[in-house]
Amino acid sequence: MSVVTRFAPSPTGFLHIGGARTALFNYLFARRHGGRYLLRIEDTDLERSTPEAVAAIHDGLNWLGLDGDGDAVSQSARAPRHIDVAEELLKAGHAYRCYLTPEELAAMREEARSTGQKITSPWRDADPATAPDRPYTVRLKMPLDGETTISDGVQGDVTVAHSTLDDLVMLRGDGSPTYMLAVVVDDHDMGITHVIRGDDHLNNAFRQIKIIEAMGWETPHYAHIPLIHGADGAKLSKRHGALSATAYRDMGFLPDAMCNYLLKLGWSHGDDEIISRDDAISWFGFDGIGKAPARFDTDKLTSLNAHYIRSMTPEALAGLILEGKDAPAHIIERLTMLAPAFAERAQLLGDLPKIGGFATHDDVPALDDDAKPLLDDDACARLHQFAADLPDGDMTPEELKTWLGGWLDQNNLKMRDIGPCLRAAVTGMKQTPDIVMIAASLGPAVLRKRIEGNCKK
RNA sequence: GACCCGUUCGUCUAGAGGCCUAGGACACUGGCCUUUCACGCCGGCAACACGGGUUCGAAUCCCGUACGGGUCGCCA
């Protein structure tokens, strides 16, 4: 049997971080089994669904490399089909028209809540001839006794007594299908074999199964994954910072880091931490998923991001340092050489231009507050001497290091006498990678210009 | 309230009765390296929610308690 999974977000905003993980798990499971991973937009609630939100979700999925196979299905477009199924269930006697008004329902619900009972519509077994002339909903007839057990891929065997299940509404008073009906019909029609979703749907599954059984369809395999919580353990909400996947892109996180982090959040493969997409595909399975909700930890995401930044190519890093701007060939070459060293101290993509900005041009860089104190009169005197003695030709870092060693000996100086002040004058900063490597990459002309510019006294 | 699910270091987790004086990662922290910062390396802190069983032996199995989460919509 070929595996078919789906990610079915409701387009009420952006791609939620929890949704992104659900999508990832669906994607991974499908790929693992050589199956298909589909997308369905649950836009049944037209009032809350917007085209912008649909676009935002696609944007988020695309960023993470989790586009669905083929075009996304729009649930709202399938309403006629959903209604047909409800009619069929009505005809077969599995469903009934319920004429309860919202007010009556509210009262019954309150009553049921206090007694711990489920609500039961009096119309379930009423004589159709007594039906009033007013809008009605179509409800599924739940079995009155017995129980249902779901063998969930993550939760294991879960059993619920039918006596706790109320007759779910499939068609609203205005004739439109509800989510409960729509998911079931769509999953069936799309041939979904494995339903992987948040465990907030676990209880719904028992209701949905009854529609499936009433239609005589095959029940899919379920895997209800635990939700993600905020750092304080509470449900993820706005006060926990960013909720949307793309907000993390804007903050400077890499999609690979995000996927790796999301994968590790609630799923594990022994002690493995850095997991490539290929490994994830070959290792992923429900047995590695924990049952308890996990807390979102930005620190760990950040450390993973730092790792993935370091693994980027020098060319890609150079592009990031330039923030997409054009630069002359010698600058590109310089940045490509320096990039790995810059990457070593970056945690977010936005750190790169801050760290390597001084190398993106040949002008004299401004001194920041930490660098200024390093350039006192003594330091500047040494730097002028250094600039005067420096040979004209370009040198490799090794050659410069050798020359510098000799120069220091001649002048009876130590590296600490020239390193910090040279760094300050040439980069404008107190902290950078190896100054010898930087100096070599800048070349004598730029070095002299910057020393003179920043040591005018 | 009813019904479902869960509970190992601060956080993510390894762990499927003896391999556990509980391992890894992030965070925190001591040190080394060094021209600064970072990386790296070495070390430290720190957990089986609680109480009963079962067993020669339990983080692992059973029961209860506490706490946390989820669901109970003509929302999805």
Image (cartoon, helix red, strand yellow):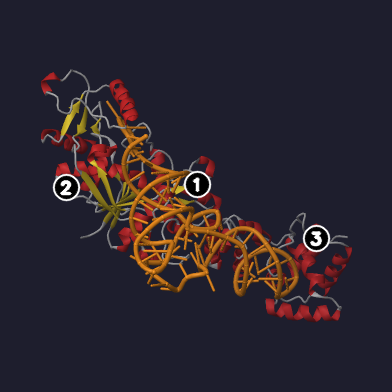
- Type of amino acid under label 3: Gly
Q: Is tag 3's residue or tag 1's residue first in the polypeptide sequence?
A: 1
Per the image, label 1 sits on a secondary structure element best described as: loop
Q: Which residue was labeled with disc 2?
A: A217
Picture quadrant of residue A350: bottom right
Q: Which residue was labeled with disc 1?
A: A233
Crowding near the residue tagged with mark 2, few <14, some 14–19, many ≥20 C-alpha atoms within 10 Å: few
- Residue A113, horizontal then vertical, whole percent: 33, 30
Identify the subunit bearing mark 2.
Answer: A
Q: Which residue was labeled with disc 3?
A: A453
The answer to whether tags 1 and 2 share a subunit is yes
The answer to whether tags 3 and 1 share a subunit is yes
The answer to the question of whether label 1 and label 2 lie on touching residues, with beta carbons closer than 8 A, is: no
- Residue A315, horizontal then vertical, whole percent: 54, 66
Q: Is tag 1's residue or tag 2's residue first in the polypeptide sequence?
A: 2
Crowding near the residue tagged with mark 3, few <14, some 14–19, many ≥20 C-alpha atoms within 10 Å: some
- Type of amino acid under label 2: Trp
